[in-house]
Amino acid sequence: MEWETRYAGRMGRVKSSPIMELIRVLAERRVINFASGLPDPAGFPAKTLREAAAEVLTEDWRGALQYGEAEGYRPLREWVAADLTTRGVPTRAEQVLIVSGSQQGIDLVARALLEPGDLVLTEEPSYLAALQVFASYEATVRPILTDGEGLDPDAAAAALRQPGVKFLYTMPSHQNPSGATLAPERRRLLLEAAAAAGVPVLADEAYLHLRYDPGEPGPLAAAAPGAHVLTVGTFSKVIAPGLRVAWVAGPAPVIARLALLKQVTDLHANSLTQRVVHRYLSAGHLPAQVASLRAAYRTKRDAFLHALTRQLAGKATWTYPAGGMFLLLRLSPGQSPTALLSKAVDEGVAYVPGAPFFPAGGGEETIRLNFVSPALGEIDEGVARLARVIGP
Amino acid sequence: MEWETRYAGRMGRVKSSPIMELIRVLAERRVINFASGLPDPAGFPAKTLREAAAEVLTEDWRGALQYGEAEGYRPLREWVAADLTTRGVPTRAEQVLIVSGSQQGIDLVARALLEPGDLVLTEEPSYLAALQVFASYEATVRPILTDGEGLDPDAAAAALRQPGVKFLYTMPSHQNPSGATLAPERRRLLLEAAAAAGVPVLADEAYLHLRYDPGEPGPLAAAAPGAHVLTVGTFSKVIAPGLRVAWVAGPAPVIARLALLKQVTDLHANSLTQRVVHRYLSAGHLPAQVASLRAAYRTKRDAFLHALTRQLAGKATWTYPAGGMFLLLRLSPGQSPTALLSKAVDEGVAYVPGAPFFPAGGGEETIRLNFVSPALGEIDEGVARLARVIGP
């Protein structure tokens, strides 16, 4: 059968990236891997999670093994609501939907809102897998001028006034791929401009807690009470991504609609791992875990920045990540990280070319680097290899 | 903000069912609950799963807690492929995608194939949550004449020849809601007619293994080698639904496309519970587990059929389920299970009116009954209450 002729039109926008496929292959070679999108498994609280799983499967196995509510495990929704409330976003459990990773949160919001041809505003660069979601609903992404302090408020206000804008997607804190954080004074301006334009904001707070400098940002929604923000958050970066537990928070009627869509999509999030995460949280393990991750990742970030300064000053520029997992390196105009990739792998270092993170094209001379995934002892050597690839 | 004006058109087809909402409320009252869609938690192998989880989180915690491949955990894909091969459907691991429950398998196939206005053929009645998926992609469902032996082959062949048919969805064995199984001689005819029409078949084998009579059916795909079948299977009914581990199998290029879509949707299935299920399977626990479930569910089915015969002969007719979890009761013309529902709950018994399972309308005098979820000792009394509600 000619399956290719039977796919829906949207599948024309769901494609494997040749670069990503290449990286997948390359990552299996023995290289220092700055290409990864993964957190460092050394940070997973495996023993505590093992104990939590044993307790859940002893004391609450009926719940953990049975079908559950589309909205998610009620005590976990209550925990998320209480945590958001303490962070300046007053939230009730009815305003929280548990989802299977923040990717699913983004996908559900997009599925609920996007018609083919709708506009989605984003940072430039922006998170590649979110861009892929918006493309899959045949939307058009329009990036907004972005600098080291996040979205430019005037550019955002102008972009928000365009007709046909369905929502604005932002990763306000320590974003992927640049590590940039939206400056405090810009947050209120952005939310006011969005409200004035009648455009909702989808805030992806995946890296909120991975802060290495003083001045931890709050969730974007805390910047303007009553703003029209849907917030996506996840336990993937602070506990473990394999558990697939994340959440969407927003107005209760919107969450109710998203829950109906969640039910159509896959009924509900994992009953077992929702309970394991809730037990972990309610036992009070999270603050120490976050502190431990911050310490380990801060050390790596500092080592990475130090190595970049020593090895690449004058050859490239790079963003400064106050948190998160990534920074973006920019080579000289005319240099192509895509063309250099196989040479880099021969040299023993892998990275992701940054161009796919630029929704309107551009960024051809940029590289995304993961500074938390490599071992601390590999960072200096990996950056030295990168310097040899880039050349004098 | 007027959120209602911002939703995509597809959300007009994603609605909560008033009946389902009513049942959700009613089910919290102290009734004998035949309305449930759930398996009996007494059948969950909790202790073995607890041990498997402890082993996975000791020996393979790095894999169980980390991001994984979109296609799923390779050893589990290999297990599913080998199992399908022994059941007459030669399958390689590349032909298997692990998904988060069979609902997600159905949703991914629909998302890959359906354009607004496309036709989907189904049994009549058919599985409500699959109908909701097809509606969410703005497809039109056309039911095919169905009897106690499943889809009528001549009616199916005629329906398959219509223009605009994207695929045929069937639950070949012990279907939800009627319990009907497609007769062996009809299987080959159906697949031949589909191949002649160039229409793929989506076979939902969720209840395949829950067989209480002799003559266990195989997967539909085994009936005609080389047929264009996508098979969805799940561990929800034979191990535990809360783990959210299921699969889609089909031609390797189609599975690769579905894996790309899975990645956009939610990256990948749960790393921990995929490994727990695989460990359970590879330790060889499944055959004894299935035998135990069959014995328990067979006893309940027999008790249910016996009670129906004693209490409702002459007042109603009902389907005969050789397996599965459900049967469909048909009252006299003019009687309305929907209108009788609150009286039933006052009497102390809950059920689901069957009408929503009929995609083109009709079925107003039918009731879906779950015979595995109630306790064995409740069945006779529950059917007696039902008889009082229905009246003389």
Image (cartoon, coloured by chain):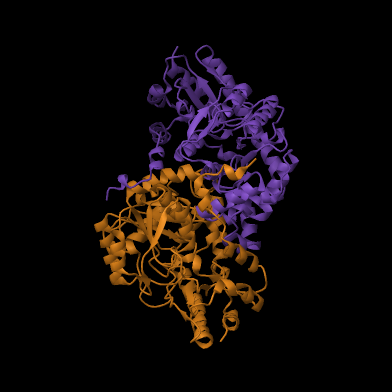
Chain colours: A orange, B purple
The answer to whether residue A56 is left or right of residue A232 is right
- Where is the C terminus of chain B found, in terms of image quarters? top left
- B59, above or below B33, in the image: below
Residue B94 visible within the image: yes
- At x 64% / y 38%, what residue is drawn? B229
The answer to whether residue B228 is left or right of residue B316 is right
Res B388 → quadrant: top left
The answer to whether residue B341 is left or right of residue B212 is left
Measured as percent of width and height from the top left, residue A182 is found at 35, 70
Measured as percent of width and height from the top left, residue B365 is found at 46, 20
Measured as percent of width and height from the top left, residue A344 is found at 62, 76
- At x 57% / y 57%, what residue is drawn? A16
Res A229 → quadrant: bottom left
Measured as percent of width and height from the top left, residue A112 is found at 40, 47
> Quick one: which residue is furthest to the front in this view?
A334
Res A1 → quadrant: top right
- At x 60% / y 83%, what residue is drawn? A388
How many numbered discs sit on the rendered protein? 0
Which residue is at the front of the view, A132 or A334?
A: A334
Residue B50 visible within the image: no
Which residue is at the front of the view, B272 or B91?
A: B91
